[in-house]
Amino acid sequence: MKTISIGAEAVVYADDALRVVVKQRQPKKYRAKELDEKLRLHRMRREAKVIEALRQLKIPVPKLINVDEKTAAITMQLIEGQKVRDTLNRGNCGSICAEIGKAVGTMHSNDIVHGDLTTSNMILGRNSNKGSARPYQPSPTDDGKVYFIDFGLSMFSNKDEDKAVDLHLFRQALNSSHHEIAGRCFAAAIAAYKKANADGLKNVLKRLEKVEERGRNKGK
Ligand SMILES: Nc1ncnc2c1ncn2[C@@H]1O[C@H](COP(=O)(O)OP(=O)(O)O)[C@@H](O)[C@H]1O
Ligand SMILES: [Mg+2]
């Protein structure tokens, strides 16, 4: 296992041969031990629950392999490919953002809010095994699909406000990481979102305006 990421909450290890990653929430010394354990367990369980729910909805997410309550660790399929953050460009942003928008619309219409929609939490899948002679691949990554990861901040919610904040954070992430094409990306995402959550979109967009107005006023 090699360490591939050390985040604020969790360390992520990968086993390339087994094609799995382990996301382990680390104990935090500044939190009381009991509270810390409770929090880590709660977040891990929620992350696993959201992954399962999205899988049922056929949204590309890593396959869950194991949830270990003792170590607060989730083992899941390793998604091969590049972060959308590192691949998004003028040429591909229309189709990639349409895929993102469609998936987020489906999440929201099922009352699931991702909570951290940045392009670092999306991987453009690439099946490196394609065409090779290796006969057995336990969980192949699908070529060209946008996979969602990182449900540490996700929640089940039917509130327009929570969904609007989700879209607001996505727009902010686009503005900061993909400034020149952000407008185009967001428009493509919303057009596709509309198809998946036609009933909800109007109210969510109305809320989004309010959320962003609040943000602007805060800056004054
Ligand atoms: N299933 C996965 N397949 C491939 N890489 C992953 C997977 N899960 C996490 N990663 C990698 O680990 C990083 C951190 O994982 P993430 O779930 O986003 O945790 P954090 O909350 O620390 O951001 C991701 O940005 C990605 O590079
Ligand atoms: Mg992340």
Image (cartoon, rainbow, N blue to C red):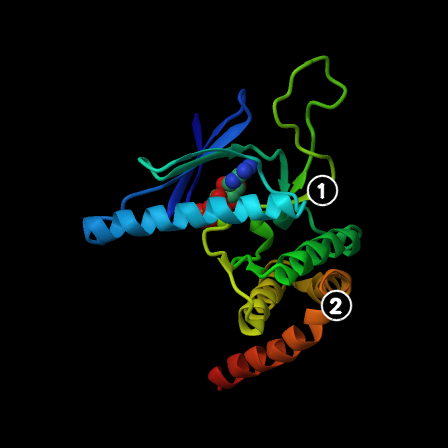
- Badge 2 crowding class, 10 Å Cα cut-off, few under 14, some 14 to 19, many 20 or more, is some
Where does label 1 land, which residue? 145
Could you say whether the residue bearing mark 1 is in a helix, strand or loop?
loop
In the depicted view, which residue is nearer to us: 152 or 50?
A: 50
Q: Quadrant of residue 147?
A: top right
From the viewer's perspective, is residue 85 above or below residue 171? above
Q: Which three-letter amino acid code belongs to the residue tagged 2?
A: Ala
The label number, if any, that marks residue 218 in the structure image = none
Disc 1 versus disc 2: distance between alpha carbons? 23 Å
Q: At x 78% / y 56%, what residue is drawn?
A: 94
Residue 149 visible within the image = no
Q: Provide residue 15's location: percent of width, then percent of height.
A: 49, 25
Q: Is mark 1 within 8 Å of ligand 1?
A: no
Relative height, residue 2 to residue 33 (above, below): above
Please tell me which residue lies in front, 199 or 9. Answer: 199
Q: Quadrant of the N terminus?
A: top left
